[in-house]
Amino acid sequence: MSNTLAVHYLPQFVAETDLAGETVVVIDLLRASTTICQALASGARDVTAFLEVGDVVRAAEAEGSREGLILAGERNCQIIDGFDLGNSPAEFTPDEVFGQRVFFTTTNGTRALQHARLASRVVVGAVVNLSAVVDAIADDQAVHLLCAGTNGHVTREDQLAAGAIAHQLLARGERDVNDQGRQVLGEWQELLTTARAFARTTSEQLAHELRDTSGGKNLLAIGMEADLARCAALDALGVVPVYDPATGRLTPL
């Protein structure tokens, strides 16, 4: 049986059962995927993903103490009232999160993680950990790249990240690729060509193109332009977050 690669533009475009027993890479480039990677790279003990704000609050109350615990996340790109951190990777420094547990909820990324709960393995992919993710999944027979989107809408930023992962993964060996996979590959290859034409690095070109994506425009509107470059920094981190559906926890591979 040949190896396969399937890209899904939104969680609702693929049934949970179609992901069962296979490898899923969850992508929410702006910004949950990048922020989770940064938190673990900065030494957080783990990141626990929750769907709703109330779920985070109840889980924190059940702990009985806030010592060693950080509440983080966003709604509409903004930090949640009463939380310690938002969803910018810049906030998750070693000074803030080293040795801490992070309870985390976002509008789109944490929902995509739960959608993949029947998979045999779920990892978080971005471009900051591009090569590390590809190293981790290269030998897996069936790989799905699951884009989180934004509020139920397809987002180009996730497609570009999926294209980057697909491009490197297919360099490791042939796979049967679905139509969406071929589409994102074409978009990523076009980005690489444009970068060469304008004498930009791939990261510089990606950050430039993120300005015109739906997620990028949302960040520009709230003065978070610097996060575009942070989320476009190819191979800035070597961490691969692995999701445990039973506990909701993400830990380094």
Image: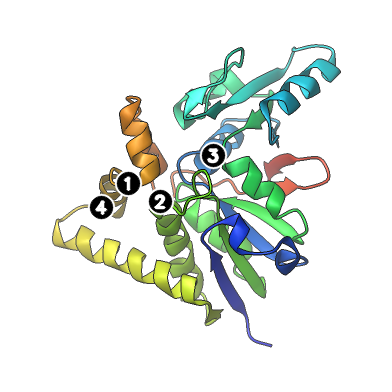
Q: Are circles 2 and 1 on residues that touch, CB within 8 Å? A: yes
Q: Earlier in the sequence, mark 4 or mark 1?
A: 4
Q: Position of residue 8 (x, y in %)?
A: 55, 64
- For label 4, the residue is 201
Q: Are circles 4 and 1 on residues that touch, CB within 8 Å? A: no
Measured Cα–Cα span from mark 4 to mark 1? 14 Å
Q: Earlier in the sequence, mark 2 or mark 4?
A: 2
Identified by mark 2, the residue type is Glu
Q: Are circles 1 and 3 on residues that touch, CB within 8 Å? A: no
Measured Cα–Cα span from mark 1 to mark 3? 15 Å
**Mark in the foreground, 4 or 1:** 1
Measured Cα–Cα span from mark 2 to mark 4? 17 Å
Q: Earlier in the sequence, mark 1 or mark 3?
A: 3
Measured Cα–Cα span from mark 2 to mark 1? 6 Å
Question: Residue, x 61% and y 12% (percent of image)?
Answer: 82
Measured Cα–Cα span from mark 2 to mark 3? 12 Å
Q: Secondary structure at mark 1?
A: helix
Q: Nearer the viewer, residue 229 or 76?
A: 76
| Residue 225 seen anywhere in this rendered image of the structure | no
Question: Residue, x 55% and y 24% (percent of image)?
Answer: 94
Identified by mark 3, the residue type is Ala
Q: Position of residue 177 (x, y in %)?
A: 52, 78
Residue 157 disc label = 2
Specify the quadrant of the image occupied by residue 102: top right
Q: Position of residue 14 (x, y in %)?
A: 63, 64
Q: Earlier in the sequence, mark 2 or mark 1?
A: 2
Residue 32 disc label = 3
